[in-house]
C-alpha cells in the first residue's frame, strides 16, 4: 500500500504506511527489511520536501546496509543520496554520491 501511495504522489499517506511497516519489522525482529523501508521512507520525504527527515532515513539505511554487507542496498541508498543532493542543488555532492554507488 505504501508503494502505491508513493507512486500516485500521495506522499503523506505513503509516509504513514512506511512508518507502520518499520514498526512492524522492528516488533517482529525482521531487521533485514529495515534498510529498504528506511530508503523508501526517505524517498517519500524527499518528494514531499522534508529534507531533514529524508537525510535522517537515508543515513539509517546506509548504516544498516553497510553493517549487514548488503552492497546493492548500499548502492541504492547512495543513489538516493545523489538525488537528495541534486534536489538541494549541491551538484558536487550529488556526483560524489553517484560515483560511490558505482
Image: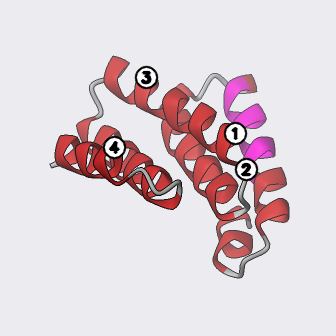
Q: Of circles 3 and 1, which is in front?
A: 1
Q: Are marks 2 and 1 in contact (CB under 8 Å)?
A: yes
Q: Main secondary structure of the magenta part?
A: helix
For marks 4 and 2, the one nearer the N-term is 2
Q: Residue at x 76, y 61 (%)?
A: 14
> Any mark on residue 50, and which?
2
How far across and down, in percent of the image, does residue 73 sit? 35, 43
Image side of residue 5 versus residue 86, left or right = right
Q: Nearer the viewer, residue 82 or 73?
A: 82
The local secondary structure at tag 2 comes to loop
- Range of magenta residues: 18-26
21 inside magenta stretch: yes
Return the residue at label 4. 93
Return the residue at label 3. 63
Task: Pick out the residue farthest to the top.
Answer: 67
Return the residue at label 1. 53
For marks 3 and 4, the one nearer the N-term is 3
Tell me the CA gap for discs 4 and 2.
19 Å
Say few, some or many: other residues with alpha carbon within 10 Å of mark 3 (under 14 / 14 to 19 / 20 or more).
some
Amino acid at each position: 500500500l505504501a508503494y502505491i501511495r508513493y507512486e500516485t504522489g500521495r506522499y503523506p499517506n505513503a509516509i504513514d504506511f512506511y512508518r507502520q511497516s518499520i514498526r512492524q519489522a522492528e516488533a517482529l525482529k525482521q531487521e533485514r527489511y529495515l534498510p529498504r523501508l528506511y530508503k523508501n521512507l526517505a524517498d517519500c520525504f524527499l518528494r514531499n520536501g522534508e529534507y531533514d527527515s529524508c537525510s535522517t532515513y537515508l543515513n539509517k539505511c546506509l548504516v544498516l546496509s553497510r553493517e549487514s554487507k548488503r552492497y546493492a542496498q548500499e548502492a541504492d541508498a547512495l543513489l538516493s543520496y545523489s538525488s537528495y543532493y541534486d534536489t538541494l542543488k549541491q551538484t558536487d555532492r550529488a556526483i560524489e554520491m553517484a560515483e560511490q554507488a558505482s
